[in-house]
Amino acid sequence: MSDTPTLGQKVGAEALGTFVLVFFGCATAVLSGDYAATGLAFGLSLLAMIYAFGRISGGHFNPAVSVGAALGGRMAWSQVLVYVGAQLVGAIVAGAVLFGILHGFEGYDSDSSVGQNFFGDQNPVADVSVWSALALELVMTAVFVWVILAVTDERNEHPALAPLAIGLALAMIHFASLNATGTSVNPARSIGPALFAGSEAIGQLWVFIVAPLLGGAVAGLTYPLIFGRSTEPIPGSGLRFGRGASAAVPGYGALDQYQQQWNQQDPQAQAGAQQGEQAWTLEQAAAQGWHWDEQAQQWRHVSEGYQPGQQGDQQGWAQEPQQQWPDPSQDDGRTQVRQPPSE
């Protein structure tokens, strides 16, 4: 049985993860009214969902992140619409559930807050102009997606810490922008509650769709230009919408499942790698000095002293000559002493 997630499982992960992010974050904003608590609720919800479902879908839970991943060469455009659809469903269901629950609170009415985003005269703290809201959300989203692309890069040797960095980054962003716009950096997070917060919230919604998508696009396009790539873009990503050549480079040891979802390979090739069937990369890897060590179950490079074995042994270490010990049956009465190792 293959461990490769199906498209249906990825859709379920994205919908459920987005639901939890929007519900817990917006519920905390409405019920606590606490600045720090709201920022931490969004950040911790995202952290928990990435740890839970990142191995399945990559844990985007945000259309801006999916767009940034596609423009950065990490994800095919053919999957972006599927991911975004799942994220919107999860966010809208979260907004509806929260809206229904809040009606059980005395004094609540449909014009009250559902945790929606705002600017201008809808901001209860300060009258923020539309251009300022746009610029703030664009910059915040670009920083957020840069962080995500960096910690999910194949060259990152500590993938287990990636969800922690992403969750803390979202909390940090909330601390900086919560009183200005209610902090979106996520069109799904904005659409879900806005649909239940009245016409004013819906009228302002375009800002929280356009700015995050632009921010995600900026980060996706510029990250490879600034920091380079560890692999070639996957087919159908970036600014190329057709099929192209895909290279699988085994650079930094075995990727964990979370990184695999963020650095997608051809599904059949990825399934083969997870089952230990390395034939699909042997030729490409050997050309770059990489060889599969069957015993250690990881890639080895010739610069480490590894050499492919001889006489049909495709995975072995180069065999060092071993000293031959005298046959005890041929003992002539003299004590056998091991020769000292050569310097």
Image (spheres, rainbow, N blue to C red):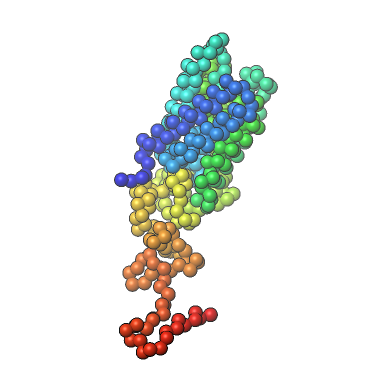
The residue that appears at 51% across and 46% down in the rendered structure is 160
Residue 181 seen: no
Residue 197 seen: yes
Residue 187 located left or right of residue 283: right
**Residue 189 % position (x, y):** 52, 28
**Residue 115 % position (x, y):** 56, 22
Number of disc labels: 0
196 in relation to 221, above or below: above
165 in relation to 30, above or below: below
**Residue 292 % position (x, y):** 40, 61
Closer to us: 330 or 99? 330
* Quadrant of the image occupied by residue 174: top right
Closer to us: 13 or 295? 295
The residue that appears at 48% across and 53% down in the rendered structure is 231
Quarter of the image that includes the N terminus: top left
* Quadrant of the image occupied by residue 135: top right
- The extreme front residue here reads 333
**Residue 123 % position (x, y):** 64, 20
- The extreme right residue here reads 126
The residue that appears at 42% across and 35% down in the rendered structure is 13
The residue that appears at 36% across and 89% down in the rendered structure is 332
